[in-house]
């Protein structure tokens, strides 16, 4: 068996698979310790706050250990798998997930004043100093200025103790004798005489016994309050309730919707429209050879109608830059399509949808829906959207008041298309009818602009030939 060395082991870290992501959950491992891997081989699937993503290993080798089990949420930049790139075999019967080990202590760098550690510089090493012996004299004992002052005042020289820097207290010989007789240490006496000289009164004051302290008034000690009973541990009936941790796509969606709802002032307008002619056109396009193999449905024509309405009212395609206090008008349309998946609601978008022909748009919509259903939508596909469509009609709902996708100024909700009585050419007839709802950010979209966009979409769906004359 080949022996592995630490130098041959490479640690693959959790990458940032989408802009700004900080963590991801390991959904499934495709390899186990002992397996041989090659550069580009997918080793695991992770779920970010945006989508499920497969991670390829960037080098050849043999899997040494998996640092985390499936279901663990790991921060970006944390090592998740160790691979022996020297080609050695894995250690005998390694555990699938290694327990965290304490970092090894590295040797102190020569000539360095710090001890190397894994993070930062560690603790600074103090220089070696000899502690001075107790009672040892200092290096210098400067003469006391008060000795000179005493001589100048005619009190005789003050004697300076050579072992200390502080001179002896200033006092005349009779005062010193008095202090000695009364047992008073002159160093503890506060002088009141001229030039800091201790007087007889100072010595007597120091010798007098301290005044008795006033007897404190009795304090009423309140009875100790009874200890609060510990809060009961919250429990629930597992047979009647199921609790699901909020994480991944659901967690990100919740945070985004709360942020959008309480940041952008939403306005929603509604219009009910006869889409009978649009439904007939859908059936005709399904038979058209140019659309063979493509997904053709009402959403295709609704998407094209919205793109034409944006072309006629380009100011709707914008965003609000709070930091710079600017309105950012986009000269491109990345059309978002809200998709319900087992992991939650996601909104991938079709890049540069405004440049696509109707067949190209049909192809892009088909790929977007299929990828979302498979759970393979990439984070890049969900970034940079400008305007969104949410089709609640597939659930039989008439309409709704959609919340803006963060960073966008408008979102169109499409209700169920139903056969309803409708006045057509002066007579009540059964017609295919739906209700559209447009929510927009009232900071940059006023009522006139929002109304024009919604009216244009409705007019195109009522008379789809406008797709040709208005495009």
Image: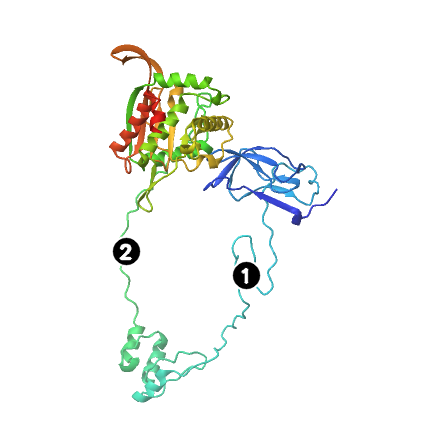
**Looking at the image, residue 11 lies above or below residue 162:** above
10 Å crowding of disc 1: few (<14), some (14-19), many (20+):
some
Please count the marks in the image.
Answer: 2
Secondary structure, mark 1, is loop
**Looking at the image, residue 297 lies above or below residue 16:** above
Q: How is the image coloured?
A: rainbow
Residue at the extreme front of the image, as rendered: 469
Sequence order check: which comes first, mark 1 or mark 2?
1
Query: Along the line of sight, which residue is nearer the eye, 182 or 327?
Result: 327
Quarter of image, res 434:
top left
**Which residue is at 28% across, 80% downward?**
200
Rendering coords of residue 343 (x, y %): 47, 28
Q: Are marks 1 and 2 in contact (CB under 8 Å)?
A: no
Rendering coords of residue 453 (x, y %): 30, 30
Residue at the extreme right of the image, as rendered: 1
Residue annotated with mark 2: 216
Comparing marks 1 and 2, which lies closer to the viewer?
Answer: 1
Residue 322 lies left or right of residue 381; in this view the side is left
Residue 347's tag is: none
**Looking at the image, residue 14 lies above or below residue 459:** below
**Looking at the image, residue 125 lies above or below residue 176:** above
Can residue 211 be seen here?
yes
Residue 231 lies left or right of residue 64; in this view the side is left
**Which residue is at 42% across, 20% downward?**
297
Rendering coords of residue 277 (x, y %): 35, 17
Can residue 247 be seen here?
no
Picture quarter with the C terminus: top left
Secondary structure, mark 2, is loop
Rendering coords of residue 3 (x, y %): 72, 45
Compute the Cα span from label 1 to label 2. Answer: 56 Å
Residue annotated with mark 1: 114
10 Å crowding of disc 2: few (<14), some (14-19), many (20+):
few
């Amino acid at each position: 068996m080949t022996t592995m060395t630490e130098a041959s082991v490479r640690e693959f870290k959790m990458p940032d698979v989408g802009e700004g992501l900080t963590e991801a959950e390991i959904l499934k491992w495709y390899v186990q310790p002992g397996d041989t891997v090659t550069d580009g081989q997918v080793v695991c699937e992770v779920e970010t706050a945006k989508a499920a993503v497969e991670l390829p290993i960037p080098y050849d080798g043999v899997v040494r250990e998996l640092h985390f089990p499936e279901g663990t949420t790991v921060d970006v930049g944390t090592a998740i798998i160790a691979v022996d790139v020297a080609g050695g075999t894995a250690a005998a019967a390694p555990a699938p997930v290694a327990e965290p080990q304490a970092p090894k202590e590295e040797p102190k760098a020569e000539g360095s004043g710090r001890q190397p550690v894994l993070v930062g510089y560690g603790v600074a090493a103090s220089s070696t100093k000899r502690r001075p012996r107790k009672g040892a004299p200092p290096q210098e004992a400067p003469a006391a200025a008060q000795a000179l002052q005493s001589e100048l005042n005619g009190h005789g020289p003050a004697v300076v103790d050579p072992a200390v820097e502080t001179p002896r207290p200033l006092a005349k010989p009779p005062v010193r004798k008095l202090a000695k007789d009364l047992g008073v240490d002159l160093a503890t006496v506060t002088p009141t005489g001229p030039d800091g000289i201790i007087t007889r009164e100072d010595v007597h004051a120091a010798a007098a016994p301290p005044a008795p302290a006033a007897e404190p008034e009795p304090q009423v000690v309140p009875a100790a309050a009874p200890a609060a009973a510990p809060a009961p541990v919250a429990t629930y009936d597992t047979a009647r309730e199921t609790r699901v941790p909020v994480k991944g796509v659901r967690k990100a969606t919740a945070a985004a919707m709360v942020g959008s709802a309480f940041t952008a002032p939403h306005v929603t307008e509604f219009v009910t429209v006869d889409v009978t002619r649009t439904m007939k056109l859908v059936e005709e396009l399904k038979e058209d050879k140019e659309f063979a193999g493509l997904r053709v449905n009402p959403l295709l024509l609704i998407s094209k109608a919205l793109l034409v309405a944006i072309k006629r009212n380009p100011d709707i395609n914008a965003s609000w830059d709070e930091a710079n206090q600017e309105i950012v008008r986009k000269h491109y349309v990345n059309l978002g399509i809200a998709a319900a998946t087992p992991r939650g609601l996601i909104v991938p978008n079709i890049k540069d949808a405004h440049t696509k022909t109707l067949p190209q748009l049909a192809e892009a919509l088909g790929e977007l829906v299929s990828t979302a259903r498979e759970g393979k939508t990439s984070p890049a596909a969900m970034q940079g959207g400008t305007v969104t469509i949410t089709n609640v009609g597939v659930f039989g709902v008439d309409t709704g008041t959609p919340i803006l996708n963060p960073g966008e100024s408008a979102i169109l909700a499409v209700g169920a298309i139903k056969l309803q009585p409708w006045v057509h050419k002066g007579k009540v007839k059964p017609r295919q009818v739906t209700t559209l709802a447009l929510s927009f950010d009232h900071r940059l979209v006023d009522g006139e602009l929002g109304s024009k966009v919604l009216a244009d979409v409705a007019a195109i769906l009522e008379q789809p030939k406008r797709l040709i004359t208005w495009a």
